[in-house]
Image: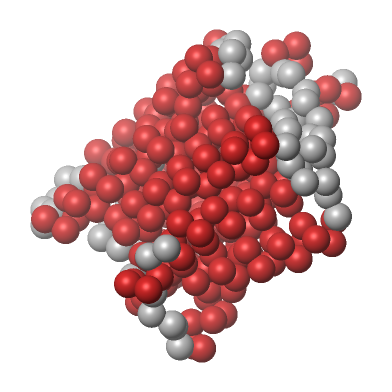
Amino acid sequence: MSNRNQKLGLAFAVACVGIATYSGMDVVMKGLSLQLGAYNAMFWRSIIAVILAGLLFAWERPTWPTTTVLKLHVWRGLVISMMAFLFFWGLKFLPVAEAIGLTFIAPLIALYLAAIILKEQISKQAILASIIGLGGAIVVITGRLGGEYNEDVGRGIAAILTSAMLYAYNLILQRQQAVVAKPIEIGFFQNCTVIILFGALAPFLAVPPSLTFLPNLAGAAVLGLVSLMMMSWAYARAPASTLLPIEYTAFAWAALFGWLVFSESVTITTLIGTAMIVAGCLVAAWQKPEQVEHVETTAV
């Protein structure tokens, strides 16, 4: 196996673990959103996350980012703030696996945004992988949306679909950030932006949680920060079009964690759709070496 193939394989594996970690955070955040509300769950989790990221950032002693890079950090932080709030609010009304399934429009949209914004060449394998993965998501969603839904669930679906549109753009910003900044820097400035934005609403919405919620809030902060840094590392070493189909593996983790934590059922359509999703990821992993552009992350 060539050195370039090995680097691609490592980036692919790190991204897969990053998605699994993020799915675990989603499950923890669902419980917190149900108990504290979406705003307070995000606000207090982000406070812990920015403290952890700040300590890592200071320990690394990096140079301060340029104005251009800082603007990119802040812009992505704003996008993520809106995206995450809508997702966690909608997640209160839907099973975790179903909510994740609805977000699977994002990688397909992001695939073509990568061509438009990042000027990446979209390979036939990447297109095929996304089609297979999206087909698996459709199978899952069709099975999940066959029952009766009340008005709150309808709002939840609308919120998550809107979040998915923002998530598609976020994936492109993630690639742009990854080639100009290190993962720890990205994690620090992203959480700072979230804190500033949500902190402006704190006098009206913030409610200090009891100490019993601290372990879950800390767990969600750690999982989110680790996932962000792993994904940033991977996106610095592989094109977005190569890694986007990995997003579909989130459903498999969401189905598993939702079943273990919230006793959410896993149906036959869930299993069939998940198999298709995994197949799509395997297709993405078989891209030719010359289609991969390796970019090292550099401090700025």
Q: Residue furthest bottom?
A: 211
| Image position of 211 with respect to 192: above or below | below
Residue 264 at x, y = what percent?
34, 63
Residue 227 at x, y = what percent?
63, 52
Q: Is residue 135 visible?
A: yes
Name the one closer to the observer, 139 or 11: 11
Q: Residue at x 39, y 48 (%)?
A: 82
Residue 280 at x, y = what percent?
52, 28
Name the quarter where the N terminus is drawn.
top right
- Figure disc tally: 0
Q: Is residue 143 visible?
A: no
Residue 267 shown left or right of residue 117 in the figure? left
Q: Residue at x 37, y 73 (%)?
A: 203
| Image position of 53 with respect to 124: above or below | below
| Image position of 116 with respect to 164: above or below | above
Name the one closer to the observer, 298 or 155: 298
Name the one closer to the observer, 232 or 63: 63
Residue 298 at x, y = what percent?
82, 35
| Image position of 153 with respect to 73: above or below | below
Here the colouring is secondary structure
Q: Residue at x 44, y 26 (%)?
A: 108
Residue 299 shown left or right of residue 161 in the figure? right
Residue 178 shown left or right of residue 164 in the figure? right
Q: Residue at x 53, y 75 (%)?
A: 216
Name the quarter where the C terminus is drawn.
top right
Name the one closer to the observer, 3 or 59: 59
